[in-house]
Amino acid sequence: MIVFKHLLKPPINNMQILDIIVHHKREELLSLKKDKPLSGLQASPYYNRVCLSLKSSIQDPLKTGIIAEYKRKSPSEGIINDQYSIEEVVKAYEANGASACSILTDHEFFGGKSEWIASVRPLLNIPILRKEFIIDAYQIHEAKAIGADAILLICECLTKAEISQFTNLAHDLGLEVLLELHSEDQLDKVDPSVDLIGVNNRNLSTFTVSLQFSRNLVDLLPNQCIKISESGIRKPSDLTELRSLGYHGFLIGTQFMKTTNPMQAFSQFVEQLPNRSKSKAKTIKDVKIKVCGMKDEGNIAALEALNVDFIGHIFYDKSPRFADALYLKGSVPKVGVFVNEMYHEIKARAVQENISVIQLHGSESPIICAELRNDGFQVWKVFGIDEAFNFEATKPYENTVDAFLFDTKTNQYGGSGRRFKWSKLHEYLGDTPFYLSGGIGPQSIIDLKVFKHPQWVGIDINSQFESSPGVKDIQLIKTFITACKEA
């Protein structure tokens, strides 16, 4: 275990804190730019890396929505925790369901280091938010160079023009932007192109904290934005309340870091969340159910009433289940299945049809997967499995998709109605969760009851439940779902 020990200066008068931090940051940047010019940042191996999507990870139903923070000290509290290394803490955050990690890189006031992000980037498969007082474009280039996936912009210390300029630069570099505000009078600074909007429950002038700020502002935020509540979330019931108000994500740091064991504190917090399903399902009772190949609107409506987890629509015109323009609506998340389409065509169709998950069934590259994920979609990549399949083929996609779907290998694109040997999946040792597909029908219940895998999170059913291509037997599916949940 690495132990960090730094001394904190005496507390600053609260009303001066933000002004003093920003003033110091300007002086700090003068020397930083001399020591490492922009060309040095651009030479970093992470500078051309494809970033993970914070938006997508926050919305992933298999995760908690929590952006878990590593913070060693603060101006208001002094030393918070210097007993655990960043590596220990953030790995435990991810293992217990964090959607992302926030890492404070300000050194003078928060005891952070920019190098920390670079050091833990290879250890994590979730996005990293660089928590910093960004006042200069140089810091955005620096964020990309050290391996961050998203940056924080703070309304309190930026103009509307700077927010727009910095957001555009971040997007040019492939980074997402979390814009933080604290009061209603900062709403006019919101740039519509930011990826997420956070309400800081901590007053940056006085450093006092109250969840009332999130309660007051939630209905004033743009409807389409991903909403994050930041700071002051002390117990699982706080998170539950905020989620019911419309928040999608929750940035929590001090609550875990101030304990004697932040890793255990985070795990216990997550375990107390209501209806919290394990992020890595073990048995058929825990997994999600996707019904694919839907194209009849009446049949879709009947299926929605069964509360399945996903409804799949095939946008591959050679399939007998091809779903022509449906202009899909409804509350159940929609999965769009595509085969070797161009990136812009996939994105346009997904937006038109209100698709939240894109399933890629062809030979799409990790780059296309990452681009779609950065657009805010969940991305699932399909692999055809037979006895000769080598799971090394999945590794290039590990950090670019949300899940794999393992189907029976055929000579064509799409399903075959046949099963592969599920015992083959014991060779899969990756960290990316997977959905099981291929020939699953009413007769599969016995085998599903005994199948187990630490990364198994769902099943994909289709032709075995049809009365005709694209039309499902609703009663048969209902009976199957009941059998799964009672297993």
Image (cartoon, helix red, strand yellow):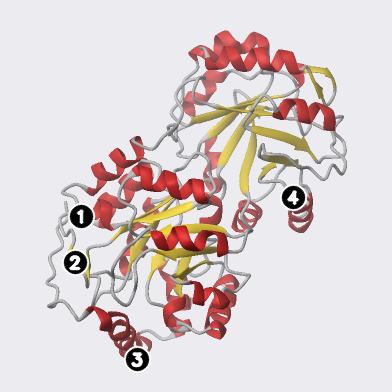
Instruction: Indicate which disc, 4 or 2, sits on the residue closer to the N terminus.
Output: 2
Q: How many residues crowd around disc 3 within 10 Å: few (fewer than 14), some, or many (20 or more)? A: few
In the depicted view, which residue is nearer to us: 244 or 231? Answer: 244
For marks 3 and 2, give the one nearer the viewer. 2
Q: Amino acid at mark 4?
A: Ala
Where 37 falls versus 301 (above or below)? Answer: below
Which sits earlier in the primary sequence, circle 1 or circle 3? 3
Q: Residue at x 73, y 30 (%)?
A: 292
Residue 35 placement, left or right of 382: left
**Quick one: 248 or 377, which is closer to the camera?**
248
Q: Is residue 349 above or below residue 464?
A: below
Residue 335: where, in percent of width, then height? 69, 39
Visible in this render: residue 209?
yes
* Drawn side of residue 391 relative to residue 88, left or right: right
Q: Quadrant of residue 10?
A: bottom left
Given contact means CB atoms under 8 Å apart, are the residues at marks 2 and 1 in contact? Answer: yes
Residue 194, x across and y down, in percent: 58, 68
As measured in the structure, the alpha-carbon distance from the residue carrying label 2 to the one carrying label 1 is: 10 Å
In the rendering, which numbered label is found on residue 86?
none
What residue is shown with label 4?
350
Disc with the residue nearer the chain's start (3 vs 2):
3
Q: Which mark is residue 258?
A: 1
Secondary structure category for the residue under label 2: loop
Nearer-N-terminus badge (1/4): 1
Closer to the chain start, of discs 3 and 4, is 3
> Disc 3 marks which residue?
30
Residue designated by label 2: 77
- Disc 1 versus disc 3: distance between alpha carbons? 33 Å
Instruction: Measure the C-alpha gap from mark 1 to mark 4.
Output: 43 Å
